[in-house]
Image (cartoon, rainbow, N blue to C red):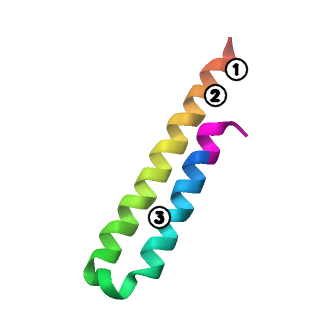
Amino acid sequence: MNKPILLTLALTLVLAWGIFHFKTQLGLLILPLFIVLVLFVTLRLYRLMEKDDDSSDR
C-alpha cells in the first residue's frame, strides 16, 4: 500500500473515533458529519484508485 492510502485511512480512523467519542456533545451533527466522512473516504480512495489504474495501463 502506498503512503496516501495509509494517511487517508489513518485520518478516517481518527475522525471516526472523534465522532464516536464526542457523540453526546455533537447531538444532531453526528449524521451529517458521518455522511461527510463517508463521502470523503469514498471519493479520496476512488481518486487514488484511478491514479493507480492509469499508471498500470502504460
Residue at 57%, 26% (x, y): give it. 51
Instruction: Please state which amino acid type lies under the numbered disc 1.
Output: Ser
Instruction: Please state which amino acid type lies under the numbered disc 2.
Output: Asp
Question: Does residue 37 sit above or below 23 in this rendering?
Answer: above
Residue 24 in percent (x, y) is at 35, 88
Residue 30 in percent (x, y) is at 34, 76
Q: Quadrant of residue 37?
A: bottom left
Which tag is nearer the camera, tag 3 or tag 2?
3
Residue 2 in percent (x, y) is at 69, 36
Reply yes or no: does residue 4 show up in magenta: yes
Q: Neighbour class for label 1 at 10 Å: few (<14), some, many (≥20)?
A: few
Q: Which residue is tagged 3?
A: 15
Report, in whole angstroms, how far the alpha carbon at label 3 lies from the one at label 1: 32 Å
Q: Neighbour class for label 3 at 10 Å: few (<14), some, many (≥20)?
A: some
The reply to whether callout 3 and callout 2 are in contact (CB within 8 Å) is no
Residue occupying the far top of the picture:
58
Instruction: Give the residues in magenta.
Output: 1-6
Q: Which residue is tagged 2?
A: 52
Q: Quadrant of residue 38?
A: bottom left
Q: Earlier in the sequence, mark 3 or mark 1?
A: 3
Q: Earlier in the sequence, mark 3 or mark 2?
A: 3
Q: Secondary structure at mark 2?
A: helix
Which tag is nearer the camera, tag 3 or tag 1?
3
Q: Secondary structure at mark 3?
A: helix
Residue 19 in percent (x, y) is at 42, 74
Residue at 50%, 35% (x, y): give it. 47
